[in-house]
């Protein structure tokens, strides 16, 4: 089983979660760690992290998610309070 960890993070919160996931998993299975990139999709499982913007997944990560097909996906995210207006 190979995996990639893909995340977007403006201020570092989501990156901290991504790093914690990386620390908890066997290093030998990791194909990619970083921001949205087609190279990440070579793995069997994608750990995908986003920060919440306007009550939803941030746009950069949403665009990447829309290109993901036929993968196991573990979704994680950070937020402050739920829905903040634009
Ligand atoms: C422009 C902007 C919009 C945000 N909108 C929301 C929101 O709608 N709901 C929410 O719960 N948090 C919102 N937040 C808070 C972030 O999602 C939260 O701080 C997150 O942990 C940031 O992740 P990061 O440190 O990985 O960038 C917003 C933050 C910013 C800067």
Image: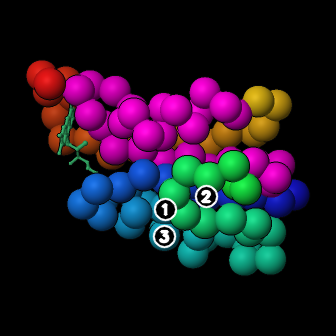
Residue 5 image label: 2
Q: Please state the extent of the stretch shown in magenta in the rendering.
A: 41-68
Front residue of 25 and 5: 5
Magenta-colored stretch includes residue 46: yes
Quarter of the view holding residue 28: bottom right
Q: Residues within 10 Å of mark 1 (few under 14, many from 20)?
A: many
* Residue bearing mark 1: 18
Compare marks 2 and 1 and give the one earlier in the sequence. 2
The residue located at (49%, 68%) in the rendering is: 20
Magenta-colored stretch includes residue 76: no
The reply to whether callout 2 and callout 1 are in contact (CB within 8 Å) is yes
Looking at the rendering, in which quadrant would you find the C terminus? Answer: top left
15 w.r.t. 83: above or below: below
Q: Residues within 10 Å of mark 3 (few under 14, many from 20)?
A: few
Q: State yes or no: Cβ of the residue under disc 3 lies below 8 Å from any atom of ligand 1.
A: no
For ligand 1, the image quadrant comes to top left
Q: Position of residue 60 (x, y in %)?
A: 44, 40
Q: Secondary structure at mark 1?
A: helix
Q: Secondary structure at mark 3?
A: helix
The residue located at (49%, 53%) in the rendering is: 7
Looking at the rendering, in which quadrant would you find the N terminus? Answer: bottom right
* Residue bearing mark 3: 19
Q: Position of residue 34 (x, y in %)?
A: 55, 63
Q: Is residue 47 left or right of residue 50?
A: right
Compare marks 2 and 3 and give the one earlier in the sequence. 2
């Amino acid at each position: 089983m190979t995996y990639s960890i893909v995340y977007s993070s403006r201020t570092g919160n989501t990156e901290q979660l991504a790093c914690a996931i990386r620390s908890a998993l066997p290093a030998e299975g990791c194909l990619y760690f970083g921001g949205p990139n087609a190279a990440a999709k070579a793995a069997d499982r994608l750990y995908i992290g986003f920060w919440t913007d306007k009550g939803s997944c941030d746009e950069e990560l949403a665009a990447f998610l829309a290109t993901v097909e036929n993968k196991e996906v573990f979704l994680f995210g950070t937020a402050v309070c739920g829905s903040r207006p634009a």
